[in-house]
Image: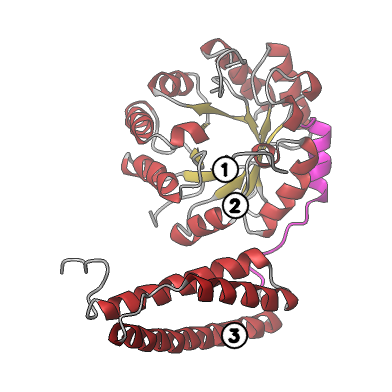
């Protein structure tokens, strides 16, 4: 997927974050047109609105469906904005494409279903131009393979204007966020697919309009390519997700206060610091290699004396003391625990190989 091309339209500034805004749901012609006109006055180029709304439980507002598609056509005619909506099955794709929708996205529940994704990819190949930009939200659960797989299905169907939407991940219990950001996952996606644009959905991550601004800034600080923000002319009376929607005026204030950092800049001082990081990384690898050699020596000793590999009391003592020490150095306890656990797991793997006469625990790939 190295030949992906821009999801932007020709008249949208490539140097600025891509902004997609509009209501969670298309409710009435008046609500759609009023919101779109206000957004157009603020310079927004892409208008989003939910036509079909997948709900967790039956009984909630699930969108008006195809009868609302002409409202988006009218938005385009009156304001010149591009239009975007979510699709979840074959019928949605056909009706949205026939209505002239400019951009589609696939929601978090759908991207988690390979059968649904293949159906959407096959239908798009039948009815849509290969130039249509298509965005894929992360699956509801933190599974990067499903996310990559959903994008690959669209890619294999001939689409190159692909992008990802990070909307956070469902977790059990009460938390600050509606959906936990788990920023490490979109970061890994960027590492795997460096040409893939990633858009942040702060509305669904935060679940509260007060969090939209801070999450948006964090996403841009991490190099995200744009934002998709739920915006409603009267959010307190919205038919769905009222709490997380902002007015066009508030959206404009948020965008005006965001700090846009130039990721392309690399001063000599920054380059020097990065070289220091590279040197330290090499030293870390050397230290880890020497540590693993000692682990293998310990494995040989345990084999000679018929000792078990894992000694839980020793491990717990190491974790406790090292985490406390690292915390005093300004590192988070969670980070230290994860790093030490990963090192311990690799040490155990090395020792078990010694006990098994250096036979790898997993078979080597066929040559």
- Left or right of 192? Residue 249 is right
User: Secondary structure under badge 3?
Assistant: helix
**Badge nearest the viewer, 3 or 2:** 2
Please identify the quadrant where the C terminus is shown.
Answer: bottom left
> Label 1 vs label 2: CA separation?
7 Å
Q: Residue at x 54, y 20 (%)?
A: 52
Q: Which residue is mark 3?
A: 275
- Left or right of 351? Residue 229 is right
The circle on residue 281 is: none
State the image quarter where residue 159 is shown: top left
State the image quarter where residue 264 is shown: bottom right
State the image quarter where residue 150 is shown: top left
Residue 104, position in %: x, y?
A: 50, 32
Q: Residue at x 55, y 27 (%)?
A: 85
Residue 230, position in %: x, y?
A: 69, 32
The circle on residue 169 is: 1
Q: Is residue 7 visible?
A: no
Q: Which residue is mark 2?
A: 182
Residue lying farthest top? 67
Q: Where are the magenta residues, as a range? A: 246-265
Q: In terms of depth relative to the viewer, which is nearer, 247 or 112?
A: 112
> Label 3 vs label 2: CA separation?
28 Å
């Amino acid at each position: 997927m190295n030949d992906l091309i821009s999801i932007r339209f020709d008249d949208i500034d490539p140097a600025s974050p891509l902004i997609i805004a509009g209501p969670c749901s298309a409710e009435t012609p008046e609500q759609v047109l009023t919101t779109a006109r206000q957004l157009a006055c603020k310079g927004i180029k892409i208008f989003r609105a939910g036509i079909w709304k997948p709900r967790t439980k039956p009984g909630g507002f699930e969108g008006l469906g195809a009868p609302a598609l002409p409202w988006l056509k009218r938005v385009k005619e009156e304001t010149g904005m591009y239009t975007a909506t979510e699709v979840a099955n074959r019928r949605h794709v056909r009706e949205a494409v026939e209505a002239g929708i400019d951009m589609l996205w696939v929601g978090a529940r759908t991207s988690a279903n390979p059968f649904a994704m293949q159906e959407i990819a096959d239908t798009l190949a039948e009815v849509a131009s290969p130039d249509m930009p298509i965005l894929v939200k992360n699956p509801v659960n933190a599974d990067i393979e499903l996310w990559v797989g959903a994008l690959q299905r669209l890619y294999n169907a001939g689409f190159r204007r692909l992008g990802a939407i990070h909307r956070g991940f469902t977790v059990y219990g009460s938390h600050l966020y509606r959906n936990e950001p788990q920023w490490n996952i979109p970061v890994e996606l960027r590492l795997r697919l460096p040409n893939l644009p990633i858009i942040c959905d702060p509305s669904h991550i935060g679940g509260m309009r007060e969090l939209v601004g801070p999450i948006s800034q964090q996403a841009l600080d991490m190099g995200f390519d744009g934002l998709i923000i739920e915006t409603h002319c009267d959010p307190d009376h919205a038919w769905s997700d009222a709490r997380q929607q902002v007015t066009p005026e508030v959206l404009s204030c948020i965008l005006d206060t965001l700090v846009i950092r130039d990721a392309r800049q690399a001063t000599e001082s920054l380059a020097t610091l990065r070289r220091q990081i590279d040197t330290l990384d090499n030293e870390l690898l050397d230290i880890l290699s020497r540590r693993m050699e000692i682990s293998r020596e310990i494995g040989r000793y345990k084999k000679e004396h018929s000792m078990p590999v894992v000694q839980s009391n020793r491990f717990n003592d190491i974790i406790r003391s090292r985490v406390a020490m690292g915390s005093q150095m300004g590192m988070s306890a969670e980070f230290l625990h994860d790093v030490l656990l990963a090192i311990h797991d690799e040490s155990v793997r090395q020792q078990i190989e010694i006990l098994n006469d250096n036979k790898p625990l997993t078979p080597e790939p066929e040559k």
